[in-house]
Image (cartoon, rainbow, N blue to C red):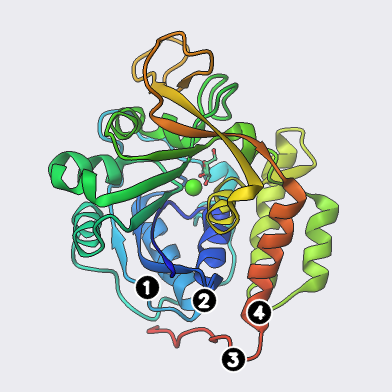
């Protein structure tokens, strides 16, 4: 039986790879994509999600969510993802329009349609999900799990303490971790090791393909940004969530209690992970601690290549 997945995202180059992987996977039924302002604003993340589904040849409903954080100041990551969010990649124009309902209503509706079955791959700031869980509390018990890319046990990437998705809406993240919905947290401790070297990117380009080739040109932009951080490889944060859904053996998880610092002096947006049970609180998340990096790259490559398999759908015809 297929797993029922909703992707909440801010595409974003690594979100784009994650979406293309998920839409290629026969084991996943992607029932919708909700978008949030994060790497770039919600106008652009919504258009990008529609264009990516169009490229995949799949008319997956896309519902636009919040542009801004619930409380915190807006943060963007255009220096990493480009002004358009996808590093200037040429994608087909969207072949269909976004949903009329906002993301938080769409999440509520999907949870009601698939009670106990719906799993959310959360790969952007958690604003939409926090809105849905607080405005429609009945939604909480209907969601099977929230599997998020965010936070870390150790260090940050947006500040010394905080990872971008959590820093971008710390109040939303705190509410999600306290919601009682089962949570899997794949943070920088594992996603930074889901990496691709410059050489690995060249190998992928050589393999090529109708989806792999535009993915490589997005990743060129992404790698250039990582080089400015002094690193000659890039981290595929968001794709790891999809890879783990398909092959849980790729990541080792430990149950921990996780709190989020919302208003600190130095550590706003930090996920405080109680690895030694100092707080004596029951775990509220399964946290990724180890990764099989080669298995991850092999799975990602296989999925992106599968768009060239005989019988695979081609892109949808654009509206523009
Ligand atoms: C996360 O932040 C965003 O820039 C990426 O898309 C990913 O979701 C990594 O910290
Ligand atoms: Ca993201």
Q: Position of residue 272 (x, y in %)?
A: 46, 19
Residue picked out by circle 3: 311
Which quadrant does the C terminus fall into?
bottom left
Which mark is first along the chain, 3 or 2? 2
Vertical side of 57 occupied by 274: above or below? above
Mark identifier at residue 210: 4
Q: Are marks 2 and 1 in contact (CB under 8 Å)?
A: yes
Pick whichever, 142 or 54, lies toward us.
142
Which quadrant does the N terminus fall into?
bottom left
For discs 1 and 4, the disc positioned in front in the rendered view: 1
Specify whether residue 37 is in view: no
For discs 4 and 3, the disc positioned in front in the rendered view: 3
Mark identifier at residue 98: none
Which mark is first along the chain, 2 or 4? 2
- Residue extending farthest bottom: 311
Q: Is residue 89 left or right of residue 12?
A: right
Give the Cα distance between marks 2 and 3: 13 Å
Q: Position of residue 149 (x, y in %)?
A: 50, 42
Residue picked out by circle 2: 56
Give the Cα distance between marks 4 and 3: 14 Å
Vertical side of 73 occupied by 186: above or below? below
Residue picked out by circle 1: 60
């Amino acid at each position: 039986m297929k797993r029922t997945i909703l992707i909440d995202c801010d595409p974003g180059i690594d979100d784009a790879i994650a979406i293309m992987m998920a839409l290629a996977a026969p084991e996943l039924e992607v029932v919708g994509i909700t978008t949030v302002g994060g790497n770039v604003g919600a106008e652009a993340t919504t258009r990008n999600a529609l264009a990516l589904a169009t490229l995949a040849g799949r008319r997956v409903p896309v519902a636009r969510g919040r542009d801004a954080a619930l409380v915190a100041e807006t943060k963007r990551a255009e220096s990493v993802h480009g002004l358009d969010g996808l590093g200037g990649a040429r994608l087909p124009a969207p072949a269909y329009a976004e949903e009329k309902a906002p993301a938080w209503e769409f999440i509520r509706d999907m949870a009601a349609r698939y009670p106990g079955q719906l799993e959310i791959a959360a790969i952007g700031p958690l604003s939409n999900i926090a809105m849905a869980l607080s405005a429609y509390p009945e939604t909480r018990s209907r969601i099977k799990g929230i599997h998020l890319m965010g936070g870390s046990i150790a260090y940050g990437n947006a500040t010394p303490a905080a990872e971008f998705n959590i820093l971008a809406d710390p109040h939303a993240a705190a509410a999600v971790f306290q919601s009682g919905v089962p949570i899997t947290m794949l943070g920088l401790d594992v996603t930074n090791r889901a990496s691709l070297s410059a050489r690995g990117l060249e190998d992928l380009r050589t393999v090529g393909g109708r989806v792999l080739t535009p993915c490589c040109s997005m990743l060129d932009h992404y790698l250039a940004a990582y080089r400015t951080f002094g690193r000659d490889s890039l981290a595929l944060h968001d794709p790891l969530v999809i890879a783990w859904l398909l092959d849980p053996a790729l990541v080792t998880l430990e149950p921990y209690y996780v709190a989020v610092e919302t208003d600190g002096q130095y550590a706003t947006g930090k996920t405080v992970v109680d690895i030694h049970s100092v707080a004596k609180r029951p775990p509220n998340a399964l946290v990724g601690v180890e990764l099989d990096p080669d298995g991850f790259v092999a799975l990602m490559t296989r999925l992106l290549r599968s768009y060239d398999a005989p019988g695979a759908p081609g892109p949808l015809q654009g509206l523009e």
